[in-house]
Image (cartoon, helix red, strand yellow):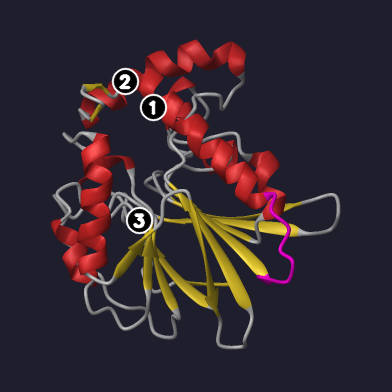
Amino acid sequence: MLLQCLSDLHLETEAYTPVPAPGADLLVLAGDIDSTWAGFERFAGWPVPVIAVAGNHEFDDRELDDAWPALRAHCSSLGIRLIEREAVVLAARDGRRIRFVGTVRWTDFDLFGAAQRERAMRAGAYFMNVQRSRRQGATFDAEAVRDEALGCRAWLAAELARPSQESWDATVVVTHFAPSVRSVDPRYGRQPASASFCNADDDLLPAADLWLHGHLHCRHDYVVPHPDGRRTRVACQARGLVSKGEDAGFDAAQLFAI
């Protein structure tokens, strides 16, 4: 199965027209497509199936509890399958069954360990102010983000621990936030604010054959080897902002094989 993956298009401000990649069997949207949601309409009638996870900016100026069912309904009306703490198994052309495991996987601010959590959460407050979201009527602050993140993490760990029992042949994880410090943006390096972009989910990587993420406005494509000889490919195909030159090197037609 060949996957086209797009994220961080930010169509609420960016002038960009997504185009189907030749040869792709599936399009994966890894979040931050359009904070107004209008940009999702560009994927209606896409020539191959489309699955998506939400990004943090899909909740800008919104109440999370209201936004989730509304975003699901909006995506469904366009033929897009939004997955959040859900797994779906799709058939590849060769008959193999591919499990797609999806969640925003909000940051828990533990990228550098519990001892650095408070410092990371202080740094992350800036991003929460930009987002201006609410949860159950209260500000969606760093504490609330961490609470959501821990729920995502618990679900993800449980799902990835499930035995396949011949129900699937390979696993693709799709998250908006990155699963490893390896995905830190090289422009900024490792600093407290990096914990607002990446999680320390390295222990979960062995359960995935391919892990697709967004959130970092740069591209990544690396392989993590495991003691048993297996390997996990981690990739980010974010476009980013033209005003910051983040689209340089972006190739929307790149395909990821699974």
The residue indicated by pointer 3 is: 7
Q: Looking at the picture, which amino acid does disc 2 mark?
A: Asp
Q: Looking at the picture, which amino acid does disc 1 mark?
A: Val
Secondary structure beneath disc 1?
helix
Mark toward the start of the polypeptide (2 vs 3): 3
Magenta stretch: includes residue 51: no
**Which of the 4 image quadrants contains residue 96?**
bottom right
The residue indicated by pointer 2 is: 141
Q: Is residue 253 above or below residue 179?
A: below
The residue indicated by pointer 1 is: 145
Label 1–label 2 contact, CB within 8 A? yes
The front one of 243 and 154 is 154
Residue bounds of the magenta highlight? 161-169
Judge from the rendering whether residue 186 lies leftward or rightward of residue 80; answer left or right: right
Tell me what residue is drawn at x 37 percent, y 46 percent: 217
- Which residue sits furthest bottom? 94
Q: Which numbered circle lies on residue 212?
A: none
User: Where in the figure is residue 148, as x and y percent of width and height?
Assistant: 42, 31
Mark toward the start of the polypeptide (3 vs 1): 3
